[in-house]
Amino acid sequence: MLNRQGRPTQAGEAAHAEHATFTGNKALQQVEPLIFEIGHHEATGVDIDKPAPFKSRLGKHARQGEIGLPGLSEPEAMRHYVRLSQKNYGIDTGLFPLGSCTMKHNARLNEKMARLPGFSDVHPLQPLSTVPGALDLMLELARYLMTLTGMPAVALSPKAGAHGEACGMMAIKAAIAAKGEGATRNVVLVPESAHGTNPATAALIGFSVKAVPARPDGTVAVEDVKALLGPDIAAIMLTNPNTCGIFEPQIVEIAAAMHEAGAYFYCDGANFNAIVGKARPGDLGVDAMHINLHKTFSTPHGGGGPGAGPVVLSERLAPFAPVPFIHVENDKPHLIETRGEAPAGNKPFGRMTAFHGQMGMYVRALAYMLSHGSDGMRQASEDAVLNANYIRAGLADLMSLPFPDHPSMHEVLFDDEWLKGSGVSTLDFAKAMIDEGYHPMTVYFPLVVHGAMLIEPTESESKAALDLFIATLRDLAMAAKGNDKERFTSAPHHAPIRRLDETRAARSPVLKWEKPAPAKAAE
Amino acid sequence: MRYLPLTDTDREDMLARIGVPDIDALFSDVPAGKLLKGPVDLPRARGELEVERILGKMAGKNTAASAVPFFVGAGAYKHHVPATVDHLIQRSEFLTSYTPYQPEIAQGTLQYLFEFQTQVAALTGMEVANASMYDGSTGTGEAVLMAHRVTKRRKAVLSGGLHPHYTAVVETLSEMANDEVVALKPDVSANEDILSQIDDSVSCVVVQSPDVFGNLRDLKPIAEKAHAHGALLIAVFTEVVSLGAVVPPGAQDADIVVGEGQSIGNALNFGGPYVGLFAAKSKYIRQMPGRLCGETVDSTGQRGFVLTLSTREQHIRRDKATSNICTNSGLCVLAFTIHMTLLGQAGLARLAEVNHANAVKLADALASVEGVKVLNDSFFNEFTVKLKKPAAEVVEVLAAKGILAGVPVSRLLPKAGLDDLLIIASTEVNTDEDRAALVAALVEVL
């Protein structure tokens, strides 16, 4: 059918056929070479005047020869990176139910606040008299974190979750050493369900690791912990809510058992977002817990960082907090930057990083907290838990729940029992979700169940979005059980790229672009 | 609450569908008495405007670098970042994506990581680079641990020119892991005898150039001696722009190179987030920490990128991993790589030239001020001066006059007897007026 200008208004047959294009592009999906293939060594996208002649003070250290990097003009660079961005899935693209990662909405107000020149354009070593507002912000963030966790102290400087774990475990190690038990208490208990960072962190700090077995119901039992306790045990690293999405019911007893045995309780706070405003780790007997500002307090994940991992500390660990920290005396904040300057009673174990930590993330996290308020943060936790359980209720009859006896917190864990005999794996199922426009859930983690699928919708999803998600997963689940293998095993079919050969990448690693050898002249 | 889509009706319907009477039924595993009955004691939700007012007031109390003549460096540097950079890194698909665990829908992130790795390898003159570390200081700590794994020794020698915060980070990590560290005393004039510290027990030597006092150091003899004893040279820099003008560490046979990349693409941010650059000889890749992005093909033969060699990493290896690191510094990497792409080698060389020229002009002007002595033989965009008064006091007086003059060494090394030393940086942002203001103020104060 034609309209009055003679323009076809119906899709016609073309819409149904796949056509290879001359360019390899598919309309909005553009094939984009590397900058090294499109740029030139003499090109640049900045205009900087050559300085007037001067006498170099580089001495014999002046660079000889060129670096070997191309430049791009500004329009070329803009187009290059915009095209790359279009090959990425983000929270703003659609539902991103990546369990344990907490892909909640990233408010742009927080970005705007972090870019205020008074925060973004201040140097960590400019005179402290010129940055009172920066110290105010750190103190206010600390106050919020301490109030929400019910803990008396916080070390802000760790740069990410794993870095926060290291900080908390170092404080524990320092406290143990201060008691003269450094040589004997050197074993850390880590449940089998833990994040891989936990055992890696313990090992980094010179502890050896002993696994706590997982109970059939997905929790850690106090008897199992007690059975392992002794004068060699330094601490337990326990995630709560745990990586199966369950609040550890015996957490208070476990904490008490640790303390009774002269050991410490490190809580992995990666899942703190489920209980903010609902329960306080300080009330549960926690000695140290890192908080992923990029999960719980919505600072953007940014394709894998930067994060921030402040650590709240109990009274007995507080004196060992690393530098820098803010010491308030007579209502005046002092930034303590070296061990030697620490006021009496403080025995900082050292320093985690140069400068003062992730200020840019502090601002964003505080903007989130100020916006939500105590009521909004509590509501956010409740909605996150509600959403996860709603998904669980919508899928439990088709997919298999390894731990049906406990309610889920902010995330629901399925295993692959229900896929048995279908010829479809967890990975295949995840890849088919991509074709449906969803980012897959976390797969194959935690390790305590087979073919894990960990779904965390967060509080940022509407009921309508959840209903469509559930309907889609039901359709996929039915197809998987109904022999429509092709929809899964070769998925994704509609992503910018098909499944990638990871074995090849690892076997002969190509980690940077190399100039291709010149083609031999045709004979 | 503007960020929460569920309505009260939704919540009721959903609870009914789940089959529980109220929300707290879902929190039934929380031990008795530990579930809070109402919101904690913090202010209630606020609108955007109110939040802007609160944070704007805090920000307004700080002196921004752009607002004054600004010469503060010592590990973080004020540079001009093209507008394109901040626009691009705020695109949703970059900002709100996760670590590229599903490579089919994360080729944007993976391709820029691959471009970044190539850029860092070229800049440092090394064979391979990883997808970044948290920052230069934590990267240095990781480099020392890596050297211990490679050499199976556990003793690091740190130059007295290493940034004191970096030294502290390495010392902290080493103390915790019961590894040995020999940190040489602060070496203002780059004439320490580090070679005599190197023997068959040493795992690595860590040397920064330009060092924290601004001196350029000759790494080659240190590399030679280290290699003769089976030790590694870890070369560190905090000012990546210097690589546009000076001999890269790779050309001086460094084994591992670590640097702070903040100068390119990233704001000062009061110390973070920044981006750690990490490069090494390719024979050591399987001992490297952090993420690596590699090239491969998809099932149709099309080129694509994936995270690779993950058998080194914590989520696979747990307590046997090369590092406990889980994230890198993704968005700061993106800012770096976009800015570096805009610069290209031509732009970077020019930027470095302007930085050096500005620092030379300033050093020459200061050399004529009575009571100021420039200590460096060589430098790039930063140098150390000796003042006839305590530097911290002078800096404070100048700050009151609206000039941020530099970093007193006593800020980094209190009680080291170096109170009269001031580290001064000058980048492309400084004008002739800025320099004249600093010189005039020093003449007045000293």
Image (cartoon, coloured by chain):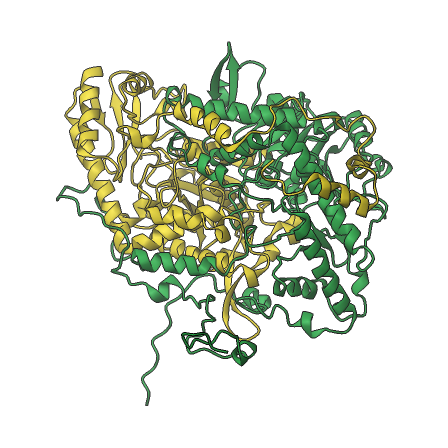
Chain colours: A green, B yellow
The correct choice, above or below, for A79 with respect to B187 in the image is below
Q: Nearer the viewer, residue B235 or A474?
A: A474
The correct choice, above or below, for B276 with respect to A342 in the image is below
The answer to whether residue A337 is visible is no
Q: How many marks?
A: 0
The answer to whether residue A421 is visible is yes
Residue at screen point 41% across, 51% down = B88
The correct choice, above or below, for B23 with respect to A13 in the image is above
Quarter of the picture containing the C terminus of chain A is: bottom left
Image position of A377 (left or right of B428): right
Horizontal and vertical percent position of residue B122: 36, 56
Horizontal and vertical percent position of residue B364: 16, 32
Image position of B268 (left or right of B391): right
Residue at the extreme left: A53
Q: Nearer the viewer, residue A295 or A313?
A: A295
Horizontal and vertical percent position of residue A301: 54, 46
The correct choice, above or below, for A199 with respect to B342 in the image is above
Q: Nearer the viewer, residue A377 or A118?
A: A377
**Quarter location, residue A114:** top left
Residue at screen point 66% across, 37% down = A380
Image position of B15 (left or right of A384): right
Residue at screen point 77% across, 74% down = A483
Residue at the extreme top: A330
Horizontal and vertical percent position of residue A468: 68, 57
